[in-house]
Image (cartoon, rainbow, N blue to C red):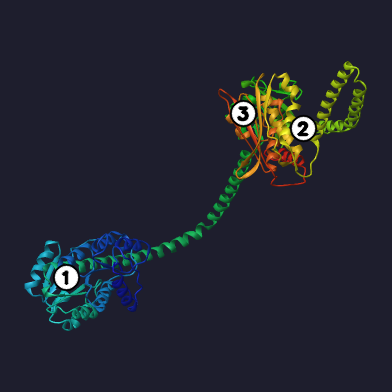
């Protein structure tokens, strides 16, 4: 039911539900059309005047939908203008009801419309030999029947006239009975409904009375509509067209049901025939199923093997005994840096000049000793580490090779298989770990030496002090002793700084960062003097956060050392220490700037990764990684900005809060190198 009046909607809902109908409601035509698409609807009751599209347009759109082409539609209106009824019937409505009519009249109209709706049908109904629709006027008065008959004939309707006594000899789609009262036609209606005809005609009664009770009584007796004879030609013609349209839908329903029965019979015959054929073909089907299953198993096995072959991280190459590649996975081509198997075949051919193999000692491997050559001769090679040199581009990498001959069931060699893995990164990691361990041992040795010489060094300084007291009368000797005292103090400072690097602090302590930076700069005095470089210090003596001194000293030394290495001869470094607030956290900011060539943007993503260095083999690639870890574990941050243009240079900024966020007693450097071990042993390395 589609009506924009909530009061009338509720009135209709109540009356229809009391009559046993399930009711869905919509306020606008658009909502009603959407509901029609998503719900099973048996009939539509539509208000003619709606916001948006009007009721007649709603009915017209419903008739355009395949699923609702035959669904009965009643149009409601408050207007008595006959043009509205004509418009509704032309749009495809089955009946036109005034809103002022009683609920009884509405229910009667709805029952009449629903009575002609059959069971489920096919949307596509064979047309057959169509005849024009026919209307039979029985006992009709000429004053109203002749204008209507003329209008129907102009539209192609077969119109005939007859008497009630001979009605059986005139089969028609619609019979119009002229009656004095509805009750007088009850016997004739019953007779027409009981006739043994394939498709019952539509029955319309025409009488003098304009009472709405006549309509209700007519529908109750079995008629499909009632019209007063004063309704006029246009209204009568439109109402008869609606009945003919409904009769056409009934005929299509019946034809569809007949076709359905015939189709079911054909299906039963075909089923019996198929059962007979199935019995004959059962053995063939079983054999085919077995063959198909084995074929699928073979295909699945082949697909699995291919997936394993393509997903291997190691290079895998299958060759014939002449060295021609039969199959190679993508990893093999990626390792050798080629895009086609033909290029890879030239790389693996010992007689070509595309590549050469060398031992780790640098000796050239003769062609006959190449792994693939030996496998083709029947010799197996296992875990042979060689250096591969690509002539084009003069690039090289380290790889471990395995090669085996492939034999058939009789033991005859038919193929050779070669696997290899790029171990360049692994070897580099092993070398860096070895150097790192050497540095750790050297650091422990230096700390031990510094500790051992500290006590005798103090004794020598005391003796020099006493000697200076005795040499006051000899200026030359006093001058020499003073110089010796200064050099010894320098040795003492170096010893103290060496111990500070290695000392393990179990808790953070208040530290003068400015003094620490000054000490570190003194450590690099010789290196700066050789490079003719100058360090400009801007230090704040009040910068005294609680830190782990050994770790922070290491972090500052790493960054300052990198700045010295990056700057050109005669350059200037700037180091500044000051108190600041970072994101609401008070702390100390240490800024170190150089005047080097800057850091390429392509290296930014690798800056703080282990073993990443712009100095090649001259650097371990661990300095910034360790520095970032130390600063982060203090609860601080490490940032940088760099420029490669003119002028160029890089500035690193370290921020550490006055109080570390995570005070801990664990060995930070130990944790760092444990993380490094996990990194090296991870599958991706």
Classed neighbour count for the residue bearing mark 1: other residues with Cα under 10 Å, few (<14), some (14–19), many (≥20): few
Image point (19%, 82%), residue name: 186
Tell me the quarter of the picture where residue 448 sits.
top right
User: Mark 1 falls on what kind of element?
Assistant: loop
Q: Nearer the viewer, mark 3 or mark 1?
A: 3
How far from the left and from the top, in percent, is residue 295? 58, 47
Location of residue 346 with respect to 510 vertically, above or below: above
Q: Nearer the viewer, mark 2 or mark 1?
A: 2
Image point (56%, 24%), residue name: 645
- Numbered label attached to residue 650: 3
- Numbered label attached to residue 310: none
* Furthest-left residue in this view: 143
User: Mark 2 falls on what kind of element?
Assistant: helix
Tell me the quarter of the picture where residue 536 sits.
top right
Nearest to the observer: residue 225 or residue 523: 523
Residue carrying label 2: 436
User: Mark 3 falls on what kind of element?
Assistant: strand
Q: Quadrant of the N terminus?
A: bottom left
Per the model, the C-alpha gap separating discs 3 and 2 is: 26 Å
Per the model, the C-alpha gap separating discs 3 and 1 is: 91 Å
Q: Is residue 470 left or right of residue 545?
A: right
Residue carrying label 1: 80
Classed neighbour count for the residue bearing mark 3: other residues with Cα under 10 Å, few (<14), some (14–19), many (≥20): many
The first of marks 2 and 1 along the sequence is 1
């Amino acid at each position: 039911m589609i009506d924009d009046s909530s009061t009338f909607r509720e009135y209709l809902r109540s009356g229809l539900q009391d009559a046993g109908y399930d009711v869905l409601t919509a306020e606008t035509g658009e909502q009603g059309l959407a509901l029609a698409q998503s719900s099973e609807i048996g009939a539509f009751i539509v208000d003619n005047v709606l916001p948006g599209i009007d009721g007649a347009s709603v009915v017209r759109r419903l008739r355009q939908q395949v699923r609702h082409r035959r669904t009965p539609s009643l149009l409601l209106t408050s207007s008595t203008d006959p043009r509205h009824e004509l418009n509704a019937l032309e749009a495809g409505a089955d009946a036109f009801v005034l809103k002022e009519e009683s609920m009884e009249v509405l229910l009667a109209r709805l029952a009449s419309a629903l009575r002609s709706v059959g069971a489920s049908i096919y949307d596509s109904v064979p047309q057959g030999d169509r005849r024009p629709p026919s209307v039979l006027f029985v006992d009709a008065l000429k004053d109203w029947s002749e204008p209507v008959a003329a209008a129907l004939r102009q539209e192609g309707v077969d119109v005939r006239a007859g008497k009630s006594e001979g009605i059986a000899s005139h089969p028609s789609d619609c019979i119009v009975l002229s009656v004095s009262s509805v009750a007088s036609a009850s016997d004739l209606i019953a007779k027409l409904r009981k006739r043994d005809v394939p498709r019952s005609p539509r029955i319309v009664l025409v009488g003098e009375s304009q009472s709405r009770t006549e309509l209700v009584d007519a529908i109750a007796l079995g008629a499909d509509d009632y019209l007063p004879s004063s309704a006029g030609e246009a209204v009568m013609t439109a109402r008869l067209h609606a009945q003919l349209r409904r009769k056409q839908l009934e005929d299509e329903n019946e034809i569809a049901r007949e076709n359905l029965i015939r189709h079911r019979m054909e299906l039963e015959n075909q089923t019996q025939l198929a059962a007979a054929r199935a019995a004959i073909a059962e053995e063939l089907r079983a054999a085919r199923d077995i063959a198909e299953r084995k074929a699928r198993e073979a295909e699945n096995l082949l697909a699995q093997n291919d997936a394993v072959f393509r997903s291997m991280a190691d290079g895998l190459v299958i060759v014939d005994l002449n060295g021609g590649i039969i199959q190679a996975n993508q990893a093999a081509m990626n390792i050798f840096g080629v895009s086609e198997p033909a290029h890879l075949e030239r790389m693996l051919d010992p007689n070509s000049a595309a590549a050469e193999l060398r031992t780790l000692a640098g000796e050239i491997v003769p062609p006959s000793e190449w792994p693939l050559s030996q496998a083709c001769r029947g010799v197996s090679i296992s875990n042979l580490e060689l250096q591969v040199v690509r002539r084009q581009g003069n690039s090289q990498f380290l790889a471990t090779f395995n090669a085996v001959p492939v034999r058939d069931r009789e033991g005859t060699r038919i193929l050779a298989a070669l696997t290899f893995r790029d171990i360049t990164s692994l070897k580099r990691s092993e070398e860096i770990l070895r150097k790192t361990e050497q540095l750790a041992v050297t650091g422990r040795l230096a700390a031990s030496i510094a500790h051992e010489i500290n006590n005798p060094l103090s004794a020598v300084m005391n003796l020099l002090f006493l000697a200076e007291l005795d040499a006051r009368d000899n200026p030359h000797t006093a001058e020499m002793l003073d110089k010796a005292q200064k050099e010894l103090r320098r040795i003492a400072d170096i010893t103290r700084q060496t111990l500070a690097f290695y000392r393990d602090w179990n808790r953070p302590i208040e530290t003068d960062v400015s003094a620490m930076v000054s000490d570190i700069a003194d450590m690099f005095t010789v290196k700066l003097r050789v490079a003719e470089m100058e360090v400009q210090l801007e230090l704040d003596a009040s910068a005294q956060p609680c830190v782990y001194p050994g770790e922070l000293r290491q972090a500052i030394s790493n960054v300052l050392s990198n700045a010295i290495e990056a700057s050109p001869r005669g350059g200037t470094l700037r180091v500044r220490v000051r108190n600041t607030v970072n994101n609401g956290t008070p702390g100390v900011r240490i800024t170190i700037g150089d005047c080097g060539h800057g850091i390429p943007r392509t290296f930014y993503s690798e800056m703080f990764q282990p073993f990443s260095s712009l100095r090649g083999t001259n650097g371990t690639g661990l300095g910034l990684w360790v520095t970032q870890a130390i600063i982060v574990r203090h609860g601080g941050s490490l940032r940088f900005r760099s420029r490669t243009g003119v002028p160029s240079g890089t500035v690193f900024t370290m921020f550490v809060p006055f109080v570390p966020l995570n005070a801990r007693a664990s060995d930070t450097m130990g944790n760092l190198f444990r993380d490094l071990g996990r990194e090296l042993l991870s599958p991706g390395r």
